[in-house]
Image (cartoon, rainbow, N blue to C red):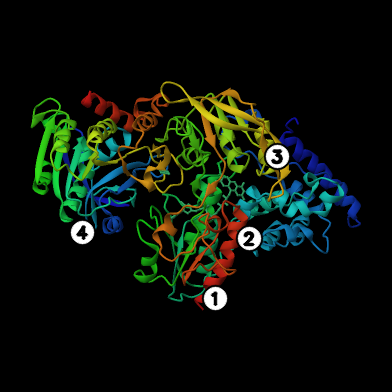
Amino acid sequence: MSHITPEALAEAAHRELDAILKKTAPLTPKERIAIPVQDMPTQDPEVRRKNVQEVALGYTPEQARLESMRCLQCRNAPCVQGCPVRIDIPGFLKAAAAGDFLGACAVIKKNSLLPAVCGRVCPQEVQCQEHCTVGKSLKSVDKAVSIGRVERYVADLERDSGKAVSPVIKPATGKKVAVIGSGPASVTVAADVRREGHQVVMFEAFHKPGGVLVYGIPEFRLPKAIVQKEIDALLAMGVEIKTNFVIGRTRKLKALIEEDGFDAVFIGTGAGLPKFMNIEGENLVGVFAANEYLTRANLMKAYDFGRADTPIYRAGRVAILGGGNVAMDAARTAVRLGAAEVHVIYRRTEVEMPARVEEIAHAKEEGVIFHLLENVSRVMGDENGCVKAVECLRYELGEPDASGRRRPVEIKGSEFIRDVEAVIVAIGNDSNPLIPRTTEGLKTTKWGNIIVDETGKTSIDGVYAGGDIVLGAATVILAMGEGRRAAASINERLK
Amino acid sequence: MNRILAKTQLSDDVYMMRLDAPHIARERLPGQFVILQLDNDYGERIPLTIADADPAEGSLTIIFQAVGKTTHNLADKAVGESVVSVLGPLGQPTHIEKFGTVVCVGGGIGVAPLHPIVKGMKQAGNRVIVIVGARNRKLVILEEQMRALADEFIVCTDDGSYGRKALVTEPLKEVCARIPKPELAVAIGPPVMMKFCAEATRPFGVHTLVSLNTIMIDGTGMCGGCRVTVGGQTKFVCVDGPEFDGHKVDFDNMMQRLKAYRKHEDTAHHQCHLDAEIQAKERSLS
Ligand SMILES: Cc1cc2nc3c(=O)[nH]c(=O)nc-3n(C[C@H](O)[C@H](O)[C@H](O)COP(=O)(O)OP(=O)(O)OC[C@H]3O[C@@H](n4cnc5c(N)ncnc54)[C@H](O)[C@@H]3O)c2cc1C
Ligand code: FES
C-alpha cells in the first residue's frame, strides 16, 4: 500500500462532506455505508523511520464527521457490547457526525477517563469495531466505523480547546486513600476517589508517573505530553503524587494502613516482570527484555543521543521475539535507532499475532521484516560474549489449544542460523512479586496475580487491586475499567 | 528531592555524602542499596550502595567514586543542594545471624557497603575479621570505623604503600586455612576482586557471599537489565540480590554485561561510569 499524503486525505474528505451537506434529506443506511472509510493521516514511512514523533496525525474535522456519519445508529448497538467500559458509542458518534465534538467527548467521558489515550492504543478491531454492523455488512472489520479514530479526534480537540471542564471535587471528607502505581488503573482510581472529596496520595516507584504509558509505549504511538496532561489533571484535582517511592521497600503496604492512617489502599502495580525464554545464550551482551529496551528509549529518552545520559544498544541487525504490541513497539524503536534490519520472529502466523492490526501494518510500512512460524532456540555469542546470531527453528500450526488458537509445533531438524547483533525478548510479562512478597496475607494466583472479588477487593480488608497486577498483562482500557470498579467500592466503603 | 547534608572528600575521586532521606533511612538494612538520578528528564539512573544510615536524623550515607558523568556531577554538588531522585532501599538485606567467625573482605569503595554488614555481623555476636584492600594508601577508606568494629583487621595495598603489599585474596586464603575455618566470607568490591575471592575460598569450602553491582534501570525487577547467571539460572540483582553465592556466580558473563555499552559510547561525556570503574579496578588488580 502506497502512502497517501495527509493533504490528499483532507482534500478528499472536504469534497465528500460538502457533497453530503448539500443534501437535504437525512442519509439512508445505504448512503452511510457508501461513505468511504476515512484513512488515518500518517507521517510518510520514509520520514518517520528517522524520528520519534507520532506516526498517526489524527483526523481533520471533516474526516471525523464523515467517519461518524458512517455509523448506522443500530438500536441494539453491538459495538457497545464490545467495549470493556460500555461507552455509548452511537451516542458520541451521533454528536460528532453533527459536528458537536465537545458534546461527543462529554458522552465518552461518562464512561472513560482517558479517551485521548484509549483512542490511540485500544485494540478496537477486537473490541467495539469487531461487532460493528457496517464492518459486518462490508465483510471486513477493517471497514467498520473507525470508532477509535473519532474518539481520539474529539478527545484531542477537547484537550486543545481548553474547554475541558475540570471535575467538581466534593467537600473534604477527612478520609485518606493510597494509590500504588500510576498507570491507567491507578490514574482512574485517583480521579474517581478524589472526586468524592477523599484525600489521595499516589505512590510511584519511577521518577515519573504514568506507568507503561510513559515507560513502555513509545512516543511515536502515544506522545508523552498527552499522558502528562492526564497527570496534570490529577494534580489540579489535588491528588498528591510521590515519585521514587516503592511500596514494599520504601514503605510496607501494611504500614500505610496501620501507621500512616490510610483508610483504603489500591494496588495498581502492573505486570512488570519480563519473561525470558530460558534458552541458551539468553544472558549474552545484546539480549534485552523489551521492557529494558523500551524504558531506555522512552522514559530515559535514550533516543536523544546527544542529550540523554542513558545509553541504548545500537545494532545493525536486530531480532525481536514475539508478536504483541510490545514486540511491535520494540521493533519500531529499533528502526528509529538506526538498525539496518529489524526481524520480528513469531511462532504462529499473522492472524494469531496479539498486536493491534494498525501496529503490524505500520511496522511493515517502516520496513520491519516478519518471520512467521519461526522461533529462536538458542542465542549465539562471539568471543566477547556479545550476540552474533540466533539459531531458529521452523514451526507449523497443529491442533487448536485451550485458547482456541492453533498450537505451533516445531519442525524437527529445521534449525538454521540468522545473523543478528541484538535480540529483544518480547514474549510477555508476569506479575511483579514485590508487593505480594512483602505483604503478609495478600492472596495471589499461582502466577502471582493478586486475587480480587467482583468489587476489586483483595484478601486484606481495605486493600483493593486492579489492572495488570490482577489480569496479567492486558490492556489500558481493561486497567481503566478495573480502576473504575475498585474506586466505586472504595467510595462505597468510605461513605 | 533529597538535600545534601554533608559532604567529605575521602580521596582523589572518592566522596562521602549524607543525604536527607527519612523513609529510606528508616527502612534500610545492611546489604541494601539505592538508585539515584540527578536529572529526571535526561539523567541516568545509577545504583549506589548505602554505607550507613541514621534513622533519627533521617539521613543516609553514600560513598561513591567520581568516574562517570553522574558521579562527577554528584561530586560537584555542594552541601545544601539537592539530589532530585533517590529510590530505595532496594534489594534483599544481608542475612545476618550468629554464624561464628565471619571474614569480610572489601576492595576499593566496596568497603562502603561492607561497613553496615560488618556492623550487623558484629552486633549479632560474630567474631569478625575484616580485610581491606586498595590500590594505595590514599584509597583506603573507612579504616578507623572498620578497625573499631573488627576483631581482627588486615589492610593491604597493591603498591605496598600501606599495610601488606598484597591482593586481598592472600590474607583471605590464610584466614580460610586456619583451624577452625571461618563459617562465612563476605566479599564486596570490583567484580574481578569478588571473582578471585570466590576462587580463594572455594577450595576451603567456606560459603562466600558477594554483592553485585550491575547496570540497573528501575531497580524493582521490571526491566531485567540487571540479570546475572547464578548456578546456571537467571537472577535479577535488584530484587533477588544484590548478594549471591560467590561460588555460583558467572562472573565472566557479568563482567561482559557490564561492558555492554562500551562500544556505544562515543562522546567523552558519555563514557560509561561503570566501564571506567571496571577499567580502573582491573588496572588496580592486574
Ligand atoms: C510496550 C507496551 C505496549 C503496550 N501497548 C498497548 C496497546 O497498544 N494497547 C493497550 O491497550 N495496552 C497496551 N499495553 C498494555 C497496557 O499498557 C497495560 O495493560 C496497562 O498499562 C496496565 O495498566 P496498570 O495501571 O495496571 O499498570 P502499569 O501501566 O503497568 O503501571 C504500573 C505502575 O506501578 C508502578 N509500580 C510497580 N510496583 C510498584 C510499587 N511496589 N510501588 C510503587 N509503584 C509501583 C510501576 O512503576 C508502574 O509505573 C502495552 C504494554 C506495553 C509494555
Ligand atoms: S534493574 Fe531492572 S530488573 Fe533489576
Q: Check whether the beta carbons of the residues at disc 3 and disc 4 lie within 8 A of each other.
A: no
**Chain of the residue that carries numbered disc 4 in the rendered image:** B
Residue type, numbered disc 1: Glu
Closer to us: mark 3 or mark 4?
4
Mark 2 Cβ and ligand 1 under 8 Å apart: no
Residue drawn at (13%, 41%), measured in percent from left and top? B179
Residue A288 pos. (x, y %):
49, 35
According to the image, label 2 marks what residue? A112
Tag 1 and tag 4 share a subunit: no
Give the spatial CA distance, label 4 vs label 2: 45 Å
**Chain of the residue that carries numbered disc 3 in the rendered image:** A
In primary-sequence order, the first of circles 1 and 2 is 2
Mark 1 Cβ and ligand 1 under 8 Å apart: no
Q: Check whether the beta carbons of the residues at disc 1 and disc 2 lie within 8 A of each other.
A: no
Residue B63 pos. (x, y %):
22, 42
Residue type, numbered disc 4: Glu
